Each structure stands twice: as C-alpha cells, then as structure tokens.
C-alpha cells in the first residue's frame, strides 16, 4: 500500500499537469478559431462520439501554417539561429573548458564555481545586462567611439547579432561543463604518447584531445541547441522586428492575436522538430554511460 | 597537464571577463546618479530608495517569494518521491512512461509548457492566480529535483538501509534515519535549484498567472521592454547579491558536510 502511494502520487501529478495538458494542446490544434471565450470551437465532443470526430477531423491549422510563409520562415530561421549560435558557443566555450582542465588542481573548484554562479543568477537579468551594453548610446559604442575605432555608433541592439551574443552569453555554462568534465577525465599520458611519437602539440590536440572530448562536445551542443530553438526572452529583448524565432511567434500568436488553435499547432510542430535532437541526445548520453561502466 | 600556456591564460581571462563584465557594469551603474543609465553622473543610492517606495515592485516581489517557497517545497517532496521510484521502485506498470515524464519537462521549451498548462487550467475552469503558478512551477521543478536526488541515490550504498531493516527499523524509519540524512545534501540542493528556477521564471509564469498575481520577472520584463532603467539595475543588483551570497554559503556548507561524512565513514571503516 505504501509502495503504491509512493509511485501513485508523483505519477498522478505528472499525468495531470504534464501529459493531459499536451493532449489538450494537441486537441485544440485541431479545432477552429472562434471569436469567443475561450476562443476556439471544440473539435471533439464526447456526446457525438468518435465517428463524428473522425468525420470532421481536419488539419486546417496545420495547412494554414504551411500556406502562410511567416511560419515556415520562423521555423527555418529559428533552426538557423540555433545551429549557428550553438557553433559559436562551442567556439567560445571550448577554449575556456580546455583552460580549466589544464589549470592547477587547486584552482579548479573555484573556476567551476565561477562558471556555475551565473547559471544561478536570473536569466532575465543576464539578458537585460546586454541591453545597456549594446544599445546605440551603450557602453560598447561609447568605448569604441572614445578609442576612435569607429566614428558612427554601431547598431547592434535589436539585430540578430545581439541575439547571437545573448545566446552565447546565457548558454555558455551549459557548453563548458560537459566539455570540461570530458577533458578532465582525459588521460594526459595519451597526449604525451602522441608527442613522443612525433606529433606536434597542435597535431596532438587535433588528433587526440578533440576526438576524446567528443562526447562532451556533443552533449554541450545539444544542451545549447535544444533550449535555444524555442527561446523567447532573448529574441524579444535583444532581437529586432526582423528576428523571427518560433518561441516569439507562438507567444505573439497567443497573447496578441489570441489565436489559440494556431498557437497550439505551432507548438505541436515545434515539439515534433525537437523530438529528433532529444532522441539523439538521449542516445549519446546512454552510449556515454555504457562506456563509463 | 598542469601547466597553463599563454593560450590557456588568455582564453580563461577573456572567458571570465565575458561572463562577468556585463554584471559588473550593471551593478556599478545601479549606483549612478543620472536617470540616463549610460551616462555616469556621480555616486548615489537614490534608485534603491525609489525601489523601496515602489509598491508595485514590492508586492510583485512578495508574490514571487511566496510562489518560490511553496513550489520548491512541494517540488522537493514530489521530486524526491519520484527519484526514489525511479531508482528503487523496481518494475511497475508504465515505468517507461514515468521516467519519460520525469525527463521530458527538462528539455521542453517553456513556451510549450506554459501554453499547455494554461489550456489545462482554462479547460477545467480554475481561476488563474498564485495557486496556478505554484502548480506550474512545482511540476517542472520536481523533475529537476528528481534528477539531482536520483543521481545521489544511485551511488548510495544500499547495505546501510538493509542493515537498518535487519536491526528492526520499519521501512519508514529506515528512510528517515538512514536514507534521508545521507541524501540530504542532494535534497537541499534540489530545493535550492527549484527555488531559483521559480524565482527566475518569466515565460511559464506569464502564461499561468492571472491579473491578480504578477511576479517579479513579469514586472521586470514589462519594464525592460521599454528600455534600460536605473531602478531595474538596482533591483538586479539586489537579486545578484542575494544569489551570490546564497550559492557561496550553500557550497561552503555542503563542502563541510561532505568532509564530515567522509570522516565518519572512515571512522566506521576503522572500527570494523
């Protein structure tokens, strides 16, 4: 009885507040928009039964998504932004993780702490901090104008460049930590062996260090890519009107246009796109766990 | 591998500068006299004073704190139960679904979680307010707690629990007297994680809150959309300060606990 309760309580909680809501999103994505409260015509009515549901089933919200090029452009540009930002984060994060792994043993806990600390501070505040730096009268432009590198202030805030900076900044710890833990476990004698066998340091790095840290690189990339794809705060604070990201589109569809069925359809498709990287990520983690044993 | 080349030194310096300079600027300029945030006009604490006189911010802060304390406590209880079921539950119907539901919220985009919960609350006709935000936050943070606690449970020596059962403890007593003290550091860090996740959340709270309940992130977001403001800088500085003190002291305490636990284990091993 006690064991039953132990399993049943969290199970029931997650079913009601996680699984059922998804079923509702899916259901509403198939219903029609209506000017009422709530603003949709239910597609499924138990009284009419399953047959009526199947007869009236249409995917018009999904067809609408393919017809209006705003949506597929938003999906494509989210993918593009997420992929490039992940790559940039890797380029910034790898040298930091590498430096941490080579730092003296007694520094490492402090360095770890310094990487994790920003993760605990508010995400919103960290994004906000860049608004003051990147704006036309911002600190970056002030410095650049003062040193005479530029004569006209650069427009960075409200462009995609600012979005990239924001993503790299906020997701950097997610990239650094898995790479660092892979590099930390790396056996230093392997690199010495490569150097003894005639590799230059750069060659040893490319041929030994990078391949051996690959599981960390893959994990870090997924940890950045997956949340970035549906990101809302960064594009809406740092991006401009030209920044199309699907999280922002969904938000506006819901709060501004109040078109719940279309917002739900946008969510369903985003979820379908995300299934692929999530499954790949799971598989990478599993392989890693098996290799460790 | 213990020598830092110039390349390592440069990348570490630049990396940490990149991580910390934006926050340092934010903190410095929160003490700026001028209303124009980007122009330095002398030291002043007047924005902190204005913040304390701003009732809208204070009441939002109160709502946020209430939500965070309630949801992180519920999430810790539910998440620890979830972790226990995952690691010790054995086989039961729908185990795969259960572990899926524990891990899925971790990778779910917030906009989708928020939207789906809102549609649920409207569907069953709950009025949105503090309670609905607590429910929403509990749901996603319990999964984080589960992951943190189950990683500790996996490495935990089961024979200790079995010994307690052999010596006449009931399963509940064995959990309270043996298991809980050992996994306590993980449970506490799970609670802290849930607490900060709740303090920080904008997207899910925006979907699930009603007009009666505005949290601090919602308030900050709507103020910040109009541009940078010195009051928000002051508020950010306070929040950064609290988190920094909290995280550093928590890590010191858990380090001490770890040292003590190691010493106890060694003493126990010697006694055998």
Image (cartoon, coloured by chain):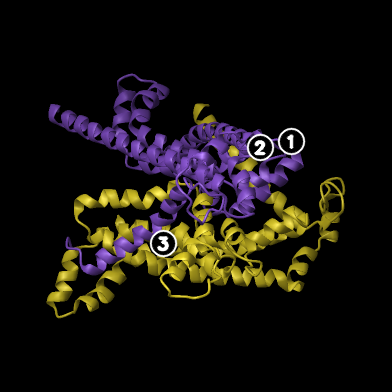
Chain colours: A yellow, B purple
Q: Are marks 1 and 2 in contact (CB under 8 Å)?
A: yes
Do discs 3 and 2 belong to a common subunit? no
- Which part of the image, by quadrant, shows the N terminus of chain B? bottom left
Q: Position of residue A212 (x, y in %)?
A: 29, 67
Q: Which residue is mark 1?
A: B127
Relative vertical location of residue B190 with respect to residue A154 in this rendering, above or below: above
Q: Within 10 Å of the Cα at label 3, are there few (<14), some (14-19), or many (20+) other Cα atoms?
A: many
Mark 3 element type: helix
For the residues labelled 3 and 1, the Cα–Cα distance comes to 40 Å
Q: Earlier in the sequence, mark 1 or mark 2?
A: 1
Q: Which residue is mark 3?
A: A220
**Mark 2 Cα-neighbour bin, 10 Å: few <14, some 14–19, many ≥20:** many
Q: Are marks 1 and 2 on the same chain?
A: yes
Q: Quadrant of the C terminus of chain B?
A: top left
> Which chain letter matches label 1?
B
The foreground one among B4 and A30 is: B4
Asked if the residue at tag 1 contacts the one at tag 3, i.e. Cβ–Cβ closer than 8 Å, the answer is no
Q: Report the front residue among A76 and B216.
A: B216
The answer to which image quadrant residue A93 occupies is: bottom left
Tell me what residue is drawn at x 42 percent, y 41 percent. Answer: B241
Residue designated by label 2: B132
């Amino acid at each position: 009885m006690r064991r039953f309760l132990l399993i049943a309580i969290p199970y029931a909680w997650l079913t009601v507040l996680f699984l059922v809501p998804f079923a509702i999103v899916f259901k509403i994505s198939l219903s029609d928009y209506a000017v009422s409260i709530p603003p949709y015509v239910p597609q499924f009515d138990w009284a009419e039964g399953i047959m009526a549901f199947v007869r009236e089933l249409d995917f018009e919200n999904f067809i609408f998504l393919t017809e209006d090029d705003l949506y597929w452009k938003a999906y494509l540009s989210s993918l593009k932004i997420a992929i490039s930002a992940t790559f940039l984060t890797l380029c910034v994060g790898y040298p930091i993780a590498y430096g941490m792994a080579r730092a003296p043993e007694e520094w490492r806990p402090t360095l770890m702490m310094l990487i994790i600390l920003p993760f605990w501070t508010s995400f919103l505040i960290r994004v906000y901090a860049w608004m003051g730096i990147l704006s036309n009268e911002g600190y970056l432009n002030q410095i650049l104008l003062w040193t005479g590198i530029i004569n006209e202030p650069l427009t960075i805030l409200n462009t995609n460049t600012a979005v990239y900076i924001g993503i790299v900044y906020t997701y950097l710890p997610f990239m650094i930590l898995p790479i660092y833990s892979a590099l930390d476990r790396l056996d230093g004698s392997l690199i010495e062996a490569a150097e003894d066998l005639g590799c230059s340091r750069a060659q040893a790095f490319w041929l030994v260090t990078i391949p051996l840290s690959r599981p960390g690189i893959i994990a870090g990339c997924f940890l950045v890519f997956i949340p970035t794809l549906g990101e809302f705060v960064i594009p809406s604070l740092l991006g401009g009107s030209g920044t199309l990201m699907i999280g922002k589109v969904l938000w506006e569809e819901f709060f501004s246009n109040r078109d719940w069925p279309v917002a739900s359809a946008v969510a369903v498709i985003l979820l379908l796109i995300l299934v692929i990287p999530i499954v790949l990520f799971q598989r990478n983690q599993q392989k890693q766990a098996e290799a460790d044993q | 591998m213990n020598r830092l080349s110039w390349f390592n030194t440069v990348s570490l310096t630049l990396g940490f500068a990149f991580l910390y300079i934006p926050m340092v600027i934010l903190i410095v300029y929160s003490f700026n006299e001028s209303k124009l945030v980007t122009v330095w006009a002398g030291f002043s604490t007047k924005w902190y004073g204005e913040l304390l006189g701003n009732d809208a911010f204070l009441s939002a802060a109160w709502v946020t704190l209430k939500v965070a304390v309630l949801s992180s406590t519920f999430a810790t209880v539910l998440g620890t139960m979830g972790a226990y079921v995952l690691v010790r539950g054995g086989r039961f119907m729908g185990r795969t679904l259960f572990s899926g539901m524990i891990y899925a919220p971790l990778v779910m985009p917030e906009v989708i979680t928020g939207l789906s919960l809102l549609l649920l609350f409207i569907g069953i006709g709950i009025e949105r307010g503090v309670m609905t935000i607590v429910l929403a936050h509990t749901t996603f943070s319990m999964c984080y707690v589960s992951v943190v606690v189950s990683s500790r449970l996996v490495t935990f020596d089961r024979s200790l629990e079995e010994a307690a059962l052999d010596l006449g403890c009931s399963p509940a007593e064995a959990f309270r007297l043996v298991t809980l003290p050992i996994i306590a550091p993980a449970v506490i860090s799970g609670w802290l994680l849930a607490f900060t996740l709740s303090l920080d959340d904008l997207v899910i709270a925006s979907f699930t809150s009603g007009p009666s309940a505005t949290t601090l992130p919602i308030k900050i977001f709507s103020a910040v959309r109009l541009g940078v403001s010195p009051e928000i800088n002051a508020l950010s500085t306070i929040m950064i300060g609290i988190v920094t003190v909290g995280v550093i002291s928590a890590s010191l305490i858990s380090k001490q606990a770890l040292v003590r636990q190691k010493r106890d284990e060694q003493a126990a091993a010697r006694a055998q």
